Amino acid sequence: MDGTDLKTRRSPIQQIVEAARPKHEPEVQAAMDAYEEIRARSREAPMLEIRFPNGRLVSFDYARLEEAEFFPEGKFILRFGRKEIIAEGKNLQRLYTTITERRQKFIREGTDEEEASKPEDAHHIEKILIQPVPEDQL
């Protein structure tokens, strides 16, 4: 069999998918691929900033987010190394999801006035607590 090239057969599904894709010039395809990669990265936040009503700011590196836990009664816990952030409020599941996807740039405690002016399904954080992770959970 010297001198012959063996071709791997494509599955019927691969053939259909490849036929359905729009064909572009190589440089156009490369530009489109680069755009998609940059777009995905631009949505990621490198740090999660915690904003308090008194103006205090605390930031945590998303790379150190080791564990996240959501409680349907209106609470989530984020563990960054030896610190944990506990947020309590309402309608927090969507916010929790954007945090675990590393797309949320900040969270903040809201005021009663802000809560009253928000739509019923909007998230609202009533309290944020930053504390050391309990010893039994290290």
Image (cartoon, rainbow, N blue to C red):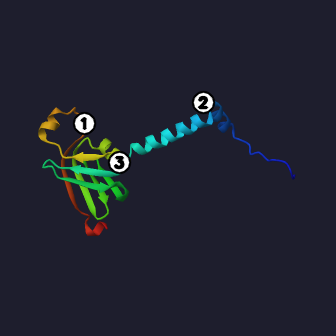
Judging by the rendered image, the residue that carries numbered circle 3 is 45
Q: Amino acid at mark 3?
A: Ala
The numbered disc on residue 22 is: 2
Where residue 76 sits in the image (x, y, percent)? 27, 51
Task: Name the residue: 25% across, 66% down.
Answer: 134
Residue neighbourhood size for the residue with mark 1, other residues' Cα within 10 Å, grouped as few (<14), some (14–19), many (≥20): few
Which residue occupies 22% across, 33% down? Answer: 120
Q: CA distance from mark 1 to mark 3?
A: 21 Å
- The residue sitting at 27% across, 44% down in the picture is 92
Earlier residue among tags 1 and 3: 3
Q: Nearer the viewer, residue 83 or 51?
A: 51
Asked where in the image residue 78 lies, by quadrant, the reply is bottom left
Helix, strand or loop for disc 2: loop
- 3 and 2 marks in contact (CB < 8 Å): no
Asked whether the residues under the numbered discs 1 and 2 touch, taking CB atoms below 8 Å apart as contact, a structural biologist would say: no
Q: Residue at x 65, y 38 (%)?
A: 14
Instruction: Choose mark 1 or mark 3, whichever is in front.
Output: 3
Name the residue type under label 1.
Answer: Ala
Q: Dot 2, crowdedness within 10 Å: few (<14), some or many (≥20)?
A: few
**Residue 73 in sight in this render:** no
Label 3, label 2: how far apart the Cα atoms are? 32 Å
Give the secondary structure at mark 1: loop
Rendered location of residue 99, percent (x, y): 33, 48
- Using the image, determine if residue 133 lies above or below residue 53: below
Q: Which residue is mark 1?
A: 122
Label 1 and label 2: CA atoms lie apart by 39 Å
Residue 89: mark: none
Q: Nearer the viewer, residue 55 or 27?
A: 27
Q: Earlier in the sequence, mark 3 or mark 2?
A: 2
Say above or below: 13 vs 67.
Answer: above
- Tag 2: amino acid: Pro
